[in-house]
Amino acid sequence: MNNETTTLMSLKEAMKRVDQKLQVLEAQFKELDFAKDNLTQKFEHHSKTLASQAAQDEMWTAVLALKFTSMELNILYSYIIEVLTCLHTRVLEKLPDLVRGLPTLASVLRRKVKNKHIRVVWESVLEECGLQEGDITALCTFFIAHGNKAEHYATKVRPMYIRDVTLMITNMVKNQALQDGLLRAVQVIEKGKAVRTPEEQKSFLKELIPSVKN
């Protein structure tokens, strides 16, 4: 009987030690799983950062590689500055209490990152104009690169220099994101809103370029 009791006690102690080891292993696995999730999140964030940086580098390269004449740059600059001014004005109309705190579009872009209210208004203004953040990135990049040497041409004067600005953009700008941003800037000024669907885009082009066929 004593031997059986001793064996049973030894078995219980062994099972207890196994259970303790299992608990230790479980804790280690949880730590490893947490570390894996943490590394995965860091990797995904790093990948997104690299992708964003690559896109920005590509945009800058495309803007700086443009082969427009000074007059053509002035025409595009005119559309861009009017769009950016329009966006800033619309934001201020929706945020009258923040007029003094948002003196420029740059201040809107900077503060919307941490201010949800400004961000929501900004996004609503973009939607009203048919624009997206990628379009603004393209337009701002162009503005920064060429704004210091460009001149604004009034609406009535532009057709005297360029008959089909849309055709000029589609022929000369090869970077798709930059081309889209410039075309939508023209659409906002000419039509009041950029078009998004292929059907709307085709209709817009047909109106500006009679040679475009169905």
Image (tube, rainbow, N blue to C red):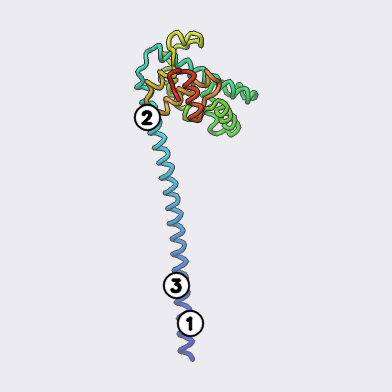
Question: Which quadrant of the figure contains the C terminus?
Answer: top left
Separation of residues labelled 3 and 2 (CA atoms): 58 Å
1 or 3: tag closer to the N-terminus:
1
Q: Residue furthest front?
A: 214
Decide: few, some or many residues near mark 3? Use Cα within 10 Å; few <14, some 14-19, many ≥20: few
Separation of residues labelled 2 and 1 (CA atoms): 72 Å
Any part of residue 105 in sight: yes
Q: Residue at x 50, y 30 (%)?
A: 197
Query: Can you identify the residue that label 3 sits on?
Result: 18
Give the x, y percent position of residue 104. 54, 21
Separation of residues labelled 1 and 3 (CA atoms): 14 Å
Decide: few, some or many residues near mark 2? Use Cα within 10 Å; few <14, some 14-19, many ≥20: some
Q: Secondary structure at mark 1?
A: helix
Give the x, y percent position of residue 138. 44, 26
Any part of residue 84 in sight: no
Which kind of residue does numbered mark 3 sit on? Val
Query: Can you identify the residue that label 2 sits on?
Result: 58
| Displayed quadrant of residue 168 | top left
Callout count: 3
Q: Is residue 155 above or below residue 131?
A: above
3 or 2: tag closer to the N-terminus:
3
Q: Residue at x 55, y 34 (%)?
A: 114
Q: Residue at x 37, y 25 (%)?
A: 174
Q: Would residue 54 be found to the left or right of residue 122 on screen?
A: left
Which kind of residue does numbered mark 2 sit on? Glu
Give the x, y percent position of residue 106. 51, 24
Q: Nearer the viewer, residue 188 or 54?
A: 188
Q: Residue furthest bottom?
A: 1
Q: Which mark is residue 9?
A: 1
Give the x, y percent position of residue 128. 58, 27
Q: Nearer the viewer, residue 101 or 6?
A: 101
Which kind of residue does numbered mark 1 sit on? Met
